[in-house]
Amino acid sequence: MGIVEDAISPSTCNRKARMTIDWQSLDFSYRDCKCHIRYIWKDGKWNDGALCEDPYLRIHIAATALHYGQSAFEGLKAFHCRDGRVRVFRADENAKRLETTATRIRMPVIPADMFTSAVHRVVRENLDYVPPYGTGGALYIRPLLFGSGPRIGVRPADEYTFLILVMPVGNYYKGGLTPVSAIVVDGFDRAAPQGVGNVKVAGNYAADLKPNEMARSQGYPINLYLDAREHRYIDEFGTSNFIAITRDNTYVTPSSPSVLPSITNKTLMTLAKDSGLKVEQRPIAFDELSSFAEIGACGTAVIITPVNRIVRNNDIVAVGPDTGCGPVLERLYNAVRGIQVGDVPDVHGWNRTVN
Ligand SMILES: *Cc1c(COP(=O)(O)O)cnc(C)c1O
């Protein structure tokens, strides 16, 4: 155990740190908080974890995460609710998904109760950094699990590090939901059908960096990937799931072996059903795009980004209103936000209070 024992001194300066954060101007940039939490897996078991103020860690030069990408992450949020309490949204789902990812790349599993207790410990210690109710912000929570033990032969490491960092993030939409244009980058695939696209491994984002930069340089903030086998079906955007509303009010989203199961998408599907929409998870051909009434990209960071134009070579598919968001996706967006900050009853029991 011994390596993560950095002492936490009861901090008086954090109140001040909090006072100096301009909650309205927060974006998604990294910033240090008071501390992160860090656990080590060695000799077949996890230690008890420790809170660490130093945002740097000492890591072996032969760590498998660095050489072979034996690394996985998660993303979730805590919110300051209307009643003054701080609540974490659906952490149990992140625990389950991390277990799937860890198993796929031969890392030790983190028991669900250890995962949620780690989340609550680190959030509790950083309460001063949770944006106040009404600012539209949240505390972004980033769990990370990776092989930290040395190994050059290609086999799983003997030692793993699990850490959770947090940072305050602002409301992505300052003046209502703003639609974006997306582009299909046919020269690249994000993930193979039986590869690792369905788990949250670090390398999947590296694969998207170049296509995403190419898309951005052409004026498209997000890029859409098609299925790697035929380029006929829609998979997902680089870091968010594809969702659409049909003209007869059905919520559709691709079923594909290479799509990452988004918790936001799962949440939206439940709320869509609650509100009487039909929900279909099925292969969606690229050719179907023009038949949709509304299209969105969904993920924890922004919940829903409306997409009103998708470009592929010389073809442009325009969907939904030119400005703003379509009515169904906007309603679903508001429903998720409402539950997260306690404005709407949490009938599914998705929130957990940080005590
Ligand atoms: C994390 C992620 C998403 C969004 O998942 P959420 O659980 O909704 O945040 C979508 N696509 C990819 C590729 C991802 O890595």
Image (spheres, rainbow, N blue to C red):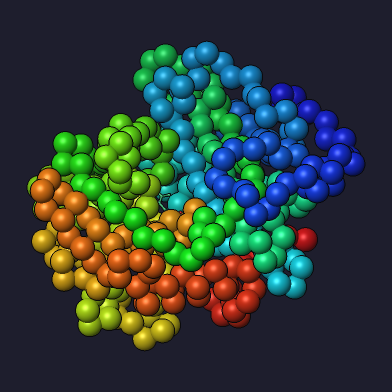
| Whole-percent x, y for residue 159 in the image | 55, 26
Can residue 263 be seen in the rendering of this structure? no
Q: Which quadrant of the figure has residue 317? A: bottom left
Q: Quadrant of the C terminus?
A: bottom right
Indicate the position of residue 351 as horizontal and vertical percent values: 61, 67
In the displayed structure, does residue 70 sit left or right of residue 128?
left
For this view, does 87 lie left or right of residue 207? right
Q: Residue at x 46, y 22 (%)?
A: 66
Q: Is residue 245 above or below residue 33?
A: below
Query: Which of 21 and 61 lies nearest the eye of the viewer?
Result: 21
Quadrant including the N terminus: top right
Q: Is residue 341 above or below residue 60?
A: below
* Residue 352 spot, x, y in % from top left: 65, 65
Residue 286 at least partly seen: yes
Q: Is residue 99 left or right of residue 161?
A: left
Q: Is residue 54 above or below residue 283?
A: above
- Image point 30% across, 66% down: which residue? 322
Q: Which residue occupies 66% across, 61% down?
A: 135
Q: Residue 59 appears at what percent x and percent y?
A: 59, 19
Between residue 148 and residue 311, name the one nearer to us: 311
Q: Residue at x 57, y 47 (%)?
A: 27
